[in-house]
Each structure stands twice: as C-alpha cells, then as structure tokens.
Amino acid sequence: MNRSRLPAPALKFLIAADLALLMASAFAQTPEEELARKVDQLADELAKVKGQLKEMQEQRAATPTPIAPAPASAGAALASGPETAAATGPAEPATVLFSYGELNYNRPTRATENTQADLRRFVLGFQHRFDDKNKVVTELEVEHAVSSADDPGEVELEQAYAEHVLNPTWSARGGLFLIPAGLLNEKHEPTAYYGVERNFVETAIIPTTWREGGLQIVGSFDNGLTLQTGISTGFDLNKWDAASTEGAESPLGSVHQELALAKGHDLSVFGALNWRGIPGLQLGGSLFTGGATQGQLGVPDARVTLWDLHARWTPGRWDLAALYARGTISNTAELNTPLVGNTTLIPKSFDGWYMQAAYKLWTYEEYVLTPFVRWEQFNTARSFADLGQGLTPDPAKTERVVTLGANFQVSPGIVLKADVQRFRENEDANRVDLGLGWSF
Amino acid sequence: MRLILAATACVLAPASAFAVDYLTADQAAKLMFPEAERFEAREIRLESPQMQQLDAQGVRARSARWSVRVAQRGGVALGFVVVDEVIGKFELITYAVGIGLDGAVKQVEVLSYRESHGQEIRMPAWRKQFVGKTNTSPMRVGDDIANISGATLSCNHVSEGVKRVVAVVEIARKSGALP
C-alpha cells in the first residue's frame, strides 16, 4: 500500500507534538540565534508535513480506498500505485463477497397458460483467505425466491470447501465442491453461458449444478493441462421415485445427494483433464464412477458412471462449443424388477450432445450483443436392461432441441437474454424465454 | 461490483501478497531486457489533462502515479518495464509489461497468480499475443486477444491492464517524463 497511511488525526497530533517539542527546547536555550535556527527547522518540518498531507489527499482523491467497493468488471487494482504495490505487498482483501442471480420468464407458445416468471436463483458466496496457502469458498443459494413449507423454493449450499496450496502446481480441496464435469458445472453463472436456460445436456444428463462432498487435488501444469481428481460421495439409487417422472427428466438429478445427510457407504472417484495450451481452445473430458445403492439391506449393488468429452474454441468473435455426455447404471434389471408397473424405471444408459455457435455481432463500450444458436439431442433413457418380454420398457425417444437467441451484455456483470426453443418430440414445450442475470 | 471486506484485514494482516509467485519484478525486467546494464526507476505523475486524454482513449487511468523502470545501456534507453496489478476474478494478478522504444509491447510476464482457475494466462502462448501491440491496438479479448476458457475475467482484466500500461508510457514519453 502507499507509504503515507497515517490518518489525518494522527498526522495533526504529530505536528502538534513536533511544535511543542521544538518550542520547548527553543525557549529553554533562549539565545536568539538558537531560536532562529529552531524556527527555520520548524518551518522546514511544517513544509514537509504539508507536502505529505497534500500527497496523501491527492492519492485518496485519485484512488478508491480498499474498504470501498472495487469495480470488478473493470478489473481495477487496489488503491496503491502499481510499483509501490508490487514492491511492498498489496493489502489484498482477505474476504471477498460474490453473488450471481437470474430471473427468467418462460412462455410456452402452445400452452401460454403455463407461462411463468421466476427468480430462478439468487446466490451469495464468499471466499476468505487465511493466508497465502489457505482459503475457504462458500456459496449459498435460494431457488425460486421463497422457501417455506408452502412455497416451491429451496435453500441450499452449493459449495463449502477449504483449499490448500501444496506448491505452485498442486492444490488440494476438501468439503462440498462442484464436480469437474462438462463445460457448465463449474462455471454456471448466467453471464458465463448462452441462453436463458442452461442447456439440456448439462442439466438432464450431467446434473448441473452437481456437487459432492470429498477430497480433490488440482494440478495446473505449464503446458496448459489441468488435472482434477479425487474421491467423493456419490448418488443414492434408493431415492429413485418410480412413480414420478423426475427420473425421466434427469436420471442423476433425481438421485443426487448434495451432501444433505448423504449416505456414504459407497464413495465415488472422479477425474477431469482439460487442456488450454492454445489460446482460445479448450479440450477436455471427465469421468465419475461409484457405487450408488449405498449398502442398503436387500438392495443389490449398482454403479453409476458418467463421462463426457467437450471442446470450446473462441477464434476472434466466435465462440464455438461441443459436448457429449453419457451415463450408465449397472445392475438395473435387478433394481427395476420390484418397480415394474411404475411410470419411470431406472435406465441402463442415458446420453446427449450439443453443438453451439455464438458470434459477437455488435459492441459499443461495454455493450455486447452476441446471437447464438444451439442444437442439442439428449435421451434420458437411451436403454433399459432386459426384464423379459412385455416387461422391459421401451427406450425413451431422443429429444432434439434448437435454441436460437442472443445474450446482450449490459456490463460485464449484467446480461439480458432472449431466445426461442423448438422441441422436435415434445412440441408442447416450444417456448420463448427472456432472462436477466448478473454475476460479480 | 465486488464488496471488499478489508477493513480489519488491512490493519491486521501482514503486508504479504497471497500469491504463488513465479518471478520478481527485477527478474522480469532482466528477462525482458537482458542487454540492459541498469534499470533506472522513474516516478511518473499524470496530470489531469493526461488522465482525461487516457479516458478519451477508452483507457481507465486508475492511478495518477506510476513507477517505470527505464532499461539502459551505455546511458542510452532501451525500453521500459512497468509492473502492475489487476484483479482477476477475486484476487490480484501481478504482471510486468516490457515496452520497446517503438512503443510496442516487447514482452508480458505474469509475476504472481492467485486465482484457483485460469493459471493458463501464464502460458507463453497466451502472453505472446501482446507482443508488438501498440497504443492503437484494441488489446481486447474476443478481438485481437484470444480468451482462455474458464478464465475470462482474468484475460479481460490483464488485457485492459496491458493496454493501460502501454497508453501511460506513451503519454509519459510525449510529455517528456520518459525518454
């Protein structure tokens, strides 16, 4: 930070003390020349202090104090002059508060009576650093605005983990963290993706926002590779509700545990590798696998495995992305046998892919208009294990969705969105979406 | 806007950077101008009209005071090195910009990076994009600078920072404050 950091009252006190001391010593010695010398010295001191005070006031006027909100989107550095900061160490904020939120309006074009407006999510989080190697990150979310026994909202912790830096390459995380899968799960703020709603593949197949409790190590290598791997809690197939359609909307979303008194008999392992060695390009994949019946008596063992491959390329004004994700659940024949006759049996496999192209069409100062188009195909029950003739459910139909719309960045932290979605199978779901999101 | 709860931290925390430090400012300067015999430290103070000039260029001046290392050999200036800091997503990124006498970026080095994601901005491939950029270059992500997926804010803010440093050095040279 800056050299002159004395508060004004302290400075005044110093001036007064200086004055008193010099006056006292001057009068004690009495000779006139001594007095004149002291007065000169006093004048010099006063000039110096005045200079310091002026400098301090100028610095304060020119730069925000660390307590004041720092403009995140502008990438402003802290108060000190850059070189001074680098030389003496900046007063870095130990605790940083962050937030994101989104308000969505969905109007089904064939069933306008189902039109909804929703404060989809409001998230508050903080990151606190204890020292140069240790920090905690938490994220608290409220979905659908109001959470009570009579309201549809939910309050949930999305992240709550501690991170420890082992060395410049490796760090370790412990707690509730987002699983590194796909392009969206770890970067799910509304300003980070196109379209009012998150894409279907990364919500129906990869259950974004997907988090587990466990331990993770993260390695960032100089060649652009990032490796994340660890051990965590997993899914609980005992939660499968065959009477509802929840499992048909998102098989894994219906059996995730979110570290809420999570059954921990079966732990899962995961890994993700991403390469960003060429600016603008990201290539990666992830794998998550683990037991999911949690050792419950009378329930056969089953394993959930989910993997994905993804790519993102941002040449110039283009932003191109593609992703394929596939999940499998083992031993579903045995699990499904007692459920036969219900609406939704446990699928053996489910998968989906999408391709997306966005183009930064117009920019003016901080305004950015980015139209995009996304084509996605997904099937939440690609196949079922054989239960015998007449009992094995038919695979679900593959849904194909085209989304055409635009993100309008009002500032780097605020986005307005609009899009139209066309469903090939369930045409009643065709809709127009409007959204407002922010993130800081 | 980001609320920084630094009131107590400022007073109580030791003045150490929370950082994975890769290079010191001196090491970066020598790396950028290996032929230099010495680096003369110059303090630049921008006046109001100069700040306004920066603003007119679309560059947020941020600070009136800048420290510049002038690389010298045999009493002749070779170029300039400026060490600066910007906030990535949550935390500070310290970086150095080397500028030649032609006003073009010679090299960018990341001295320390503290974010959990986006360390890839340290890669030579990303930093090399700035080489040769001048005061008239956009130096904007999605324009003449490619993004790193997952580190958009770090890329944006470092790009803005490099552009600012180039503009400040240019203005300082025009005013005669730098050779």
Image: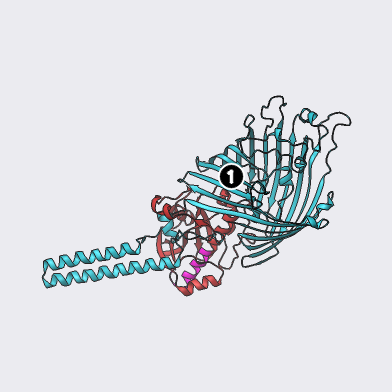
Chain colours: A cyan, B red
The residue nearer to you, when weighing A167 against B81, is A167
From this viewpoint, which residue is outermost toward the front? A150
**Chain letter for mark 1:** A
Residue B179 in the image, given as x and y percentages of width and height: 44, 68
Displayed quadrant of residue A216: top right
Q: Magenta residues: mostly which secondary structure?
A: helix
The residue nearer to you, when weighing A147 against A109, is A147
SS category of the residue bearing label 1: strand
Residue B150 versus residue B167 in the image, above or below: above
**Can residue B74 be seen here?**
no
Question: Which image quarter holds the C terminus of chain A?
Answer: bottom right
**Can residue A11 be seen here?**
yes
Answer left or right for B173 relative to A250.
left
Displayed quadrant of residue A301: top right
Answer left or right for A90 relative to A378.
left
Residue A82 in the image, given as x and y percentages of width and height: 45, 60
- At a point 80% along the width and 52% down the height, the residue shown is A429
Was residue A350 drawn as part of the magenta stretch in this picture? no
Residue A166 versus residue B169 in the image, above or below: above
Residue A2 versus residue A234 in the image, above or below: below
Residue B146 in the image, given as x and y percentages of width and height: 63, 56
- At a point 61% along the width and 67% down the height, the residue shown is A365
Residue topped by disc 1: A159
Q: Residues within 10 Å of mark 1 (few under 14, many from 20)?
A: many
Question: Which image quarter holds the N terminus of chain A?
Answer: bottom left
Q: Amino acid at mark 1?
A: Gln
From this viewpoint, which residue is outermost toward the right? A390
Was residue B175 drawn as part of the magenta stretch in this picture? yes
From this viewpoint, which residue is outermost toward the bottom? B49
Magenta residues (range)? B164-177
Residue B130 versus residue A329 in the image, above or below: below
Residue A209 in the image, given as x and y percentages of width and height: 66, 45
